[in-house]
Image (cartoon, helix red, strand yellow):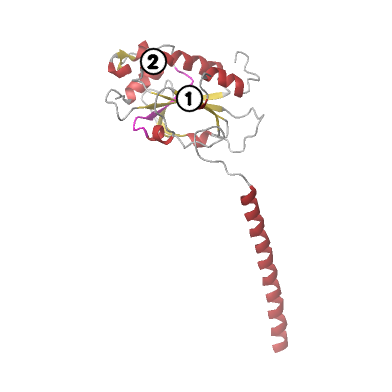
């Protein structure tokens, strides 16, 4: 009986030793993978993963209904170069109280329409905490987006329907009046634009490309296959 117990224990020890050896090999392999894989750095420069943009968002024609928005949820982590099945992104920080943004509305409309189906435009509507003239409201943001009758845009001095361009039907508007995303992305002025690849990685940062406008950058970086007019 003692001999049988010794054999059983020896067999059990052998199996346990084999299991521990296999687990050790697996852990070493995992460590090698992590040590040799380049992690994407966080930031807003080209090749970096920008901070998430979260908040309440408004779609054109949705009335006063806002929904929870999460930029990361829209990205495709498995995207590879040449894959045309996922949308690129233009993230543009704007303010309804910014006179330059009032005059930039036609550019946003034209580009978002021309690139429909390939690029999702996201307008992040901010207020500047250090300037009391920037005091937008959800109603003002909607009026700016849809170009409807509302006095309050451009430091409260203009009707929102006087901005350049037509309604922004293809642009998601995100409420960032608390400037949380603005601060995370290091925004100091509006409008400021970024182009993101479908996986969320920054492909173009306006501040790093002085002299090149957003439209030129889009034509240079984003595949226009099948878009016709784009």
Q: Residue at x 68, y 61 (%)?
A: 25
Q: Residue at x 67, y 56 (%)?
A: 29
Q: Which mark is residue 102?
A: 2
Q: Secondary structure at mark 1?
A: strand
Q: Is residue 1 visible?
A: no
Query: Against 178, is 121 above or below?
Result: above
Magenta span covers which residues?
A: 168-179
Quadrant hosting residue 5: bottom right
Left or right placement of residue 217 versus residue 225 in this view = left
- Above/below status of 140 relative to 39: above
Quarter of the image with the N terminus in it: bottom right
What SS does tag 2 mark? helix
Which residue: 70% across, 84% down? 6
Label 1 crowd (10 A; few <14 / some 14-19 / many >=20): many
Q: Nearer the viewer, residue 211 or 116?
A: 211
- Reading the image, the residue beneath label 1 is 193
Label 2 CA crowd tier, 10 Å (few <14, some 14–19, many 20+) = many
* Residue 39: x %, y % from top left: 58, 44
């Amino acid at each position: 009986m003692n001999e049988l117990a010794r054999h059983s224990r020896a067999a059990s020890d052998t199996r346990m030793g084999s299991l521990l050896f296999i687990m050790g090999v697996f852990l070493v392999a995992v460590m090698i993978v992590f040590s040799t894989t380049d992690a994407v750095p966080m930031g807003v420069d080209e090749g970096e993963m920008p901070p998430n943009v979260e908040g309440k968002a408004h779609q054109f024609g949705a009335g006063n209904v806002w929904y929870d928005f999460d930029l990361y949820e829209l990205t495709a982590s498995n995207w590879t170069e040449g894959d045309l099945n996922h949308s690129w992104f233009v993230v543009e920080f704007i303010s309804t109280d910014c006179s330059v943004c009032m005059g930039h509305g036609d550019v946003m409309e034209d580009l978002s329409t021309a690139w429909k189906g390939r690029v999702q435009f996201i307008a992040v509507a901010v207020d500047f905490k250090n300037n009391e003239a920037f005091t937008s409201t959800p109603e003002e943001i909607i009026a700016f987006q849809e170009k409807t009758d509302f006095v309050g845009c451009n430091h409260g001095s203009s009707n929102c329907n006087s901005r350049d361009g037509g309604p922004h039907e293809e642009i998601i508007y995100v409420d960032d009046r608390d400037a949380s995303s603005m601060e995370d992305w290091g925004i100091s002025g509006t409008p400021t634009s970024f182009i993101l690849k479908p996986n969320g990685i920054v492909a173009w940062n306006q501040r790093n490309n002085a002299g090149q406008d957003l439209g030129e950058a889009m034509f240079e970086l984003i595949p226009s296959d099948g878009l016709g007019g784009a």
